[in-house]
Amino acid sequence: MFRIPPRLVSFLALCLIAVTGIILILRATPNGLGLSDDSIAYIAGARSMVAGDGYREAWLASNQPVTHFPPAFSSVLAFFGRFGIDPLRAVRWVNALLFGLNAALLGILGWRMTPSLMAGVVLAALFVFSSEMFSVHAVAMSEPLFIFLSLMAFWMFDLYFERHHHWLWMIACGTFVGMAYLTRYAGLALIATFAAALLILHTTWRKRLASIGILLASALPWILGWSIRNRLIAGNATNRAFAWHPLTSENIEPGLRVFSDFLIPIEPLRRVLFRQPGVIEGLILLVLGGVLVWVVVTAWRYLSNPQQERTGIEAREVLSFTTGLFIFAYLASIVASMLMFDAATKFKLRILAPVLVSLLILLVVFGIWLRSRRPVVVIVLMLFTLGISGYRQSITLNTWANSELGYASFQWYDSKAMDFLSALPEDVMIYTNEPGAVYLYIGRGCYVLPDRFDSSTAIARTNFEKGVALMQEDIHQGKAVLALFDGGENVSSDVPALTAGLYLAHKSTGDEVYTAEP
């Protein structure tokens, strides 16, 4: 009787899961991915590249070179733009493909770090069934690409130890780290992670210093090249300025919701616990604290019992141990950014997505460890988790398929204010609280509104009144209009000052366009 090898069955199952992930994204986003201000920045930057103008802020009238957003994601979209595919359309297929590839990569990593073929399949299935991971890939943002490059770096790092510390694998790891940095600046956490892991996992200082040197030599050219470019054309490395600003509830509270959704998949139970003071915070501390204790104990075991080669169970621990290190290196980098460089950063889903992926990996590792002690418990928990995750995912898919988010919403498709703006002469400037949306729907760069507060530095601006006066002078002279969108950023407190003395030329569903007196 013909018998199919288990490895082939596992491989085919993994391929099926990856293809399923791609189809889920495409089926749930028939009108395109969800869009936000950052999404438009990436898309506009890609269009600028395709046009031969370089990586520029095409969604703004100033059209300055982009330094705030790294270029890798826009470069991928621009690649498809070279073949006549608009980056706005290409991004849907790119993120769908990345959803499938990331699931496949997790499956491969699951095979490598456990003795079970089933572990890789379960890990990939948990990823595809995760409503959080789906939502991250269903928005036109750089996180899916960052996750892909990070997983590739982890794979290369594991191969470096498997192939007896051959330097080519460390070069490959450093290269993916550099590309991850060019996708998100948080890629610096990968350097800290792998450097710390090499110090712990290697047994001699010669190997430690040599491997870290190769890692840095492979990653730094990507980082320095981008930083030098920014310094030469814009006078800054990443468009971040050092300024101390403590964490606030606005930074932290979104993260509590993200973690509660991820850790408590049963929604009625999650709502009850979320209302109880300290419960979610305690649960997060319990999970992260448990991971931290395991990382410290594992590191101490390696350091206190050095040996020439890692074999057996310890060799398989390279991936899981390094993943645990990455969680804390990444969280530390985000907190440092919030404290010193960008007060506007919040623990939103997309920011925490790499941590959630790492927790999925460690969940499967824990399941394999528990299986040898309580196999029935593991099987029941696995089926329960997959079932609940699949159910939640079906709800998420229906939500996405029947309504779009951000600028993909019909609120913007049907906007009469957009029709009004599109009829303006090309030489009329547009001041608006939604420059990304205006760029997307009428294809013109806009001017941002004067504001009283710099959200990135948490410092009050002193030139608000001057900015308003200059804007209104342009409007009174017929050179510009002011468009305020009800669904955009909250400018309600400043609307009277912004619109004083201006003529309301158009009003529809909360959107307003002000011009000079006719």
Image (cartoon, rainbow, N blue to C red):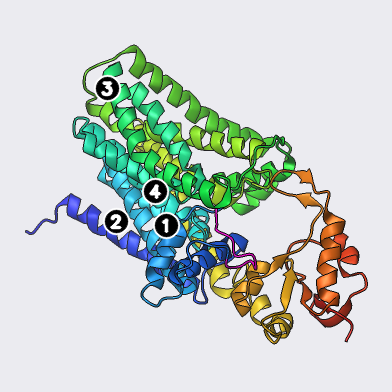
**Residue 371: image location, x then y, percent:** 34, 35
Q: Nearer the viewer, mark 2 or mark 4?
A: 4
Cα–Cα span, label 1 and label 4: 24 Å
Q: Earlier in the sequence, mark 2 or mark 1?
A: 2
Residue 14's disc is 2
Return the residue at label 4. Answer: 179
Check disc 3: other Cα within 10 Å, few if <14, some if 14-19, many if 20+.
some
Q: Earlier in the sequence, mark 2 or mark 4?
A: 2
For the residue pair 267 and 399, the one nearer the viewer reads as 399
Cα–Cα span, label 2 and label 1: 11 Å
Left-right relation of 22 to 292? left
Q: Residue at x 78, y 76 (%)?
A: 481
Span of residues in magenta: 58-67
| Residue 196, placed above or below residue 3 | above
Secondary element type, mark 3: helix
Q: Identify which amino acid the numbered label 4 is placed on.
A: Met
Q: Residue at x 29, y 28 (%)?
A: 211
Q: Quadrant of residue 255?
A: top right
